[in-house]
Image (cartoon, rainbow, N blue to C red):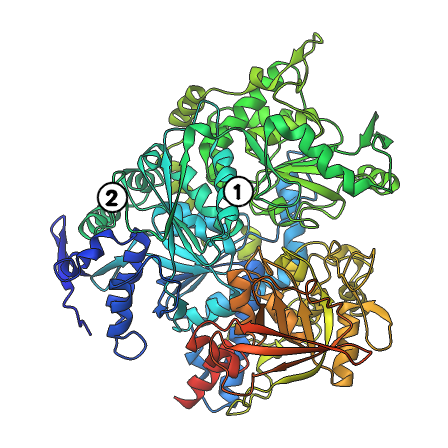
């Protein structure tokens, strides 16, 4: 259909293409010209997908008549052009698709219909760990261990690549999915069957938004929603508000894109942009490199937005050429974006819901931490900020000057509070940006020339998001200097940023435990939530790669490096940060000399082939997977067992108990950790019972293809604080009415055996962080029927609905504390059975043991009619199975 008559043609270099012309609407709807660029991309998507059923004329009119000040209320269906996955979330997605094929066959349907309809790419980047470091053999040793631990998973993924069409797998040791997406996979404009349209995507990782910096609309979703998109289901969403972020001025000498994104994150998190689009505009944008824009887009989950978007301009076109995209394609991108009004104009001010403004000249050198990305600390405030953060961590436990002497490798030293035990150049957030990587290399060079090196208690690592990074650091002659200060290559992948920092050297770990020391990491990543980076590290600071090197040289975070020396040279002279910090001119000269398009073309020419180990895997064939019941990595998921033809009508919840009472900013890392499996956890007991030795536990992330491990790991984060228990950290709770203190998993099993439904009580920003679908899947398998919170982060709320768990929001100004809820009550939730509807008000009654009650209203955060369908059916994938079986 083409109700608005927008279908037309565009000639590019003598070739004619079809497009859905946005400018054709401006005569009848002049407001189209002032729509935000990201909103225009949604509009084109609806025009192209209009079918009179899923996408109707009124949906298009909703965008045409979009009121930027109106609260989101109008639902649209968005069809992404492709899906991006990483292996931690990709393995359970492939497992679900494999199990859905079996379930559909049992329901009388054609199993081959469970197949991606749009291109879906999976990049293996989450599995490599930093076991070996500061060693030229570290990449090989770490990769060998990666295969040893994950061969079973990799065989499964290679089976999927053969069994499903439109599905490709980028092998290990290639890079990080978002950097590979930026440098290679991202199209900006698609050409399919002679039609041009914007490249759009959803990804199973919250940092999918990094591609927003290249002018591509895309965001992170849970694996559940991504699987639905792969199968042709639209992403339903309320038409969002769009916040404009105006940039003026220019970054000062020595200020990095990392410093800028930490300021942006602080400002937008304070503003509150959850569920909103953020679009960057203004004259200051023109002076930002494409890579700097990608850094800002990358951290949209940290500032809470759905996307952090930059429109296409000359910088994007230059980047496409710089990274080796074909000239014919680059010409199409430029012509299409200019024709469609998608080309960035630094003088334009589109219609925005609200506007923030930042003078780039005010940005200063900063870190963020020790527990949240939005907690920015200017470098000159680090000492006072450290002291303020340390005080509550050690109060009543250890002395401020506590230290433990260590002798290791013939060197003696003290480890104390504030010691930097991990310094990691990691994450696509920064390793995609040559300016900060070259800056780190030049700083290392100057440090070596002054006789400086990393302190012996610091575990150092360099893990780029692309093989091209190592190529240009070698070409620039900087890799030897990075190695001399400790930053040897450890492999290609996410590593420390996602908690794959590997164990601390034993003497350091023992010192931390013996002294109950609060030690620190400094990393160039995007997240620093407690318990994420390393179980021994309680302070985690985000910083630019040059600052990461500087803190490795200094060895502690208690100092003010704007005034105090980083170290002393061979003559005993103080060396300050300003003495070794490279100039912008030095960085740019090195980039121009060392980085060439040929490096990108060469590395990505064989991106799907993999190394010898990948090609040597013995891979089964067939349309269905032969599950091994003895496997501890890939088990048939239970979500599609014995599905009745029709769903049961929604029921009120009665007699429920609280499984956990949680505070604010509970992350998906708290709910479903990705890293270390504690030896005392229920997951560890399961693995040991199945013949797995402690050294082979791997991580929760690597075990996501096994629901038995994952549901035991739900709420098992070692830093989780259940407010039902005083002074206890970790995944523990109290079973009511027995009063027995148990792991959350064991309590859940006991409740389920008793037939008792469960609820979670939580504070604000519940489910912040990663897109982690297992945070919802695990919640479902633990028997939780509803989560009652002050507010939800976007992706996790959607995931809960997608698994048939009811997200409920307290009335404004209320929470568990204000209502004097302790978690020991019995809960009833009324109104679910009576015409449940999006945003319906429900009534909760909490009954105390003494018979007194507290009654309060909550809002059902089922936001759209489509989401209501998903909830009624017990989840989005079950809903789709029933639809496929019927058709």
Q: Which residue is disc 1 drawn over?
A: 266
What residue lies at 50% left-to-right and 36% top-to-bottom?
258
The numbered dot on residue 875 is none
| Relative horizontal placement of residue 456, taking residue 187 as reference (left or right) | right
Q: Which mark is residue 327?
A: 2
Q: Position of residue 270 (x, y in %)?
A: 52, 46
Which is nearer the N-term, disc 1 or disc 2?
A: 1
Position of residue 236 measured from the top left corner of the image (x, y, whole percent):
40, 70
Image check: 208 left or right of 803?
left
In the image, is residue 211 above or below residue 772? above
Query: In which image quadrant can residue 84 be found?
Result: bottom left
| Residue nearer the viewer, 62 or 79 | 62
Instruction: State yes or no: discs 1 and 2 in contact (Cβ < 8 Å).
Output: no
Neighbours of disc 1 within 10 Å: few (<14), some (14-19), many (20+): some
Residue 331 drawn above or below residue 451: below
**Which one is nearer the viewer's eye here, 546 or 365?**
365
Q: Is residue 590 above or below residue 353?
A: above
The answer to whether residue 409 is seen in the rendering is no
Farthest top residue? 571
- Per the image, label 1 sits on a secondary structure element best described as helix
Q: Nearer the viewer, residue 341 or 588?
A: 341
Residue at 64% from the left image edge and 34% from the top image edge = 136
Total marks in image:
2
User: At which x and y percent is residue 716?
Assistant: 73, 61
For this view, does 413 lie left or right of residue 798? Answer: right
Residue toward you, 62 or 262? 62
Above/below status of 693 relative to 880: above
Residue 845, given in percent of the width and then of the height, sits at 67, 78
């Amino acid at each position: 259909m083409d109700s608005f008559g927008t279908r037309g043609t565009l000639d590019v270099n003598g070739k004619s293409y079809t497009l859905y012309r946005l400018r054709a609407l401006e005569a009848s709807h002049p407001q189209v010209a002032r729509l935000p660029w990201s909103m225009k991309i949604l509009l084109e998507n609806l025009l192209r997908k209009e079918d009179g059923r899923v996408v109707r004329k009124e949906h298009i009119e909703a965008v045409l008549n979009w009121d930027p000040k109106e609260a989101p209320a109008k639902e649209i269906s968005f069809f992404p052009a492709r899906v991006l996955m990483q292996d931690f979330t990709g393995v359970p997605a492939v497992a679900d698709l494999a199990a859905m094929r079996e379930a559909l066959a049992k329901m009388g349907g054609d199993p081959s219909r469970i197949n991606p309809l749009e291109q879906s790419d999976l990049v293996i980047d989450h599995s490599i760990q930093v076991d070996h470091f500061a060693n030229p053999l570290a990449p090989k040793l770490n990769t060998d261990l990666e295969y040893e631990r994950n061969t079973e998973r990799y065989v499964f993924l290679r089976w999927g690549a053969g069994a499903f069409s439109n599905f490709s797998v980028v092998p290990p040791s290639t890079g990080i999915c978002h950097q590979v997406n930026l440098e290679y996979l991202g199209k900006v404009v698609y050409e399919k069957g002679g039609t041009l349209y914007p490249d759009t995507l959803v990804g199973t990782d919250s940092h999918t938004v990094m591609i927003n910096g290249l002018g591509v609309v895309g965001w992170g979703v849970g694996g559940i929603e991504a699987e639905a998109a792969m199968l042709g289901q639209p992403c339903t969403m309320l038409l969002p508000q769009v916040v404009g972020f105006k940039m003026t001025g220019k970054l000062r000498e020595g200020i990095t894109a990392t410093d800028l994104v930490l300021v942006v994150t602080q400002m937008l998190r304070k503003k509150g942009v959850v569920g909103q689009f953020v679009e960057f505009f203004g004259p200051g944008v023109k002076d930002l490199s494409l890579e700097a824009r990608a850094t800002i887009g990358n951290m949209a989950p940290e500032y809470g937005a759905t996307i952090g978007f930059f429109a296409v301009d000359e910088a994007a076109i230059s980047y496409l050429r710089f990274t080796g995209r074909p000239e014919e394609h680059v010409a199409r991108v430029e012509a299409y974006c200019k024709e469609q009004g998608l080309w960035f104009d630094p003088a334009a001010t589109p219609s925005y819901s609200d506007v923030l403004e930042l003078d780039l000249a005010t940005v200063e050198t900063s870190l963020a931490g020790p527990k949240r990305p939005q907690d920015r600390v200017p470098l000159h405030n680090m000492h006072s900020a450290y002291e303020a953060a340390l005080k509550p961590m050690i109060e009543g436990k250890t002395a401020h000057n506590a230290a433990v002497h260590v002798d290791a490798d013939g060197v003696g030293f003290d480890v104390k509070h504030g010691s930097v035990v991990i310094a990691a150049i990691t994450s696509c957030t920064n390793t995609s940006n040559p300016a900060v990587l070259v800056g780190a290399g030049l700083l290392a060079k100057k440090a070596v020339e002054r006789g400086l090196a990393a302190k012996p208690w610091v575990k150092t690592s360099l893990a780029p998001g692309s093989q091209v990074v190592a190529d240009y650091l070698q070409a620039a002659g900087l890799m030897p200097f990075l190695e001399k200060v400790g930053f040897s290559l450890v492999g290609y992948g996410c590593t420390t940023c996602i908690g794959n920092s590997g164990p601390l050297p034993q003497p350091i770990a023992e010192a931390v435990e013996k002294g109950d020391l609060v030690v620190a990491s400094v990393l160039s990543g995007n997240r620093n939530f407690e318990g994420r980076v390393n179980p021994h590290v309680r302070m985690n600071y985000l910083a630019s790669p040059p600052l990461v090197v500087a803190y490795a040289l200094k060895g502690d975070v208690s100092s003010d490096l704007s005034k105090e020396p980083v170290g002393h040279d061979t003559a005993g002279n103080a060396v300050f940060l300003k003495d070794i910090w490279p100039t912008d001119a030095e960085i740019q000269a090195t980039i121009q000399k060392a980085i060439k398009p040929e490096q990108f073309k060469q590395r990505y020419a064989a991106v799907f082939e993999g190394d010898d180990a990948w090609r040597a895997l013995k891979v089964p064939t067939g349309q269905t997977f032969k599950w091994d019941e003895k496997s501890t990595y890939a088990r048939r998921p239970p979500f599609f067992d014995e599905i009745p033809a029709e769903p049961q009508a929604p029921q009120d919840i009665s007699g429920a108990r609280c499984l956990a009472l949680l505070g604010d900013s509970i992350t998906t890392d708290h709910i479903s950790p990705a890293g270390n499996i504690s030896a005392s956890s229920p997951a560890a007991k399961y693995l040991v019972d199945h013949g797995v030795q402690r050294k082979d536990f791997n991580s929760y992330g690597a075990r996501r293809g096994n629901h038995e491990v994952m549901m035991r790991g739900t709420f098992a984060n070692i830093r989780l604080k259940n407010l039902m228990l005083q002074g206890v950290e970790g995944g523990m709770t109290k079973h009511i009415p027995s009063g027995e203190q148990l792991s959350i998993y064991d309590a859940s099993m006991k409740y389920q055996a008793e037939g008792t439904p469960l609820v979670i009580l939580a504070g604000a920003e519940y489910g912040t962080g990663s897109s982690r679908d297992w945070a919802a899947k695990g919640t479902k398998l633990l028997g939780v029927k509803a989560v009652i919170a002050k507010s939800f982060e976007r992706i996790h709320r959607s995931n809960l609905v997608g698994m048939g768990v009811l997200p409920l929001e307290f009335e404004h100004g209320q929470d568990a504390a204000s209502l004097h809820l302790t978690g020991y009550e019995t809960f009833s939730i009324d109104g679910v059975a009576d015409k449940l509807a999006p945003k319906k008000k429900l009534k909760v009654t909490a009954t105390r043991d003494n018979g007194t009650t507290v009654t309060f209203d909550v809002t059902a955060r089922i936001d759209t009619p489509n989401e209501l369908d998903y909830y009624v059916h017990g989840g989005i994938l079950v809903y789709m199975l029933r639809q496929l079986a019927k058709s």
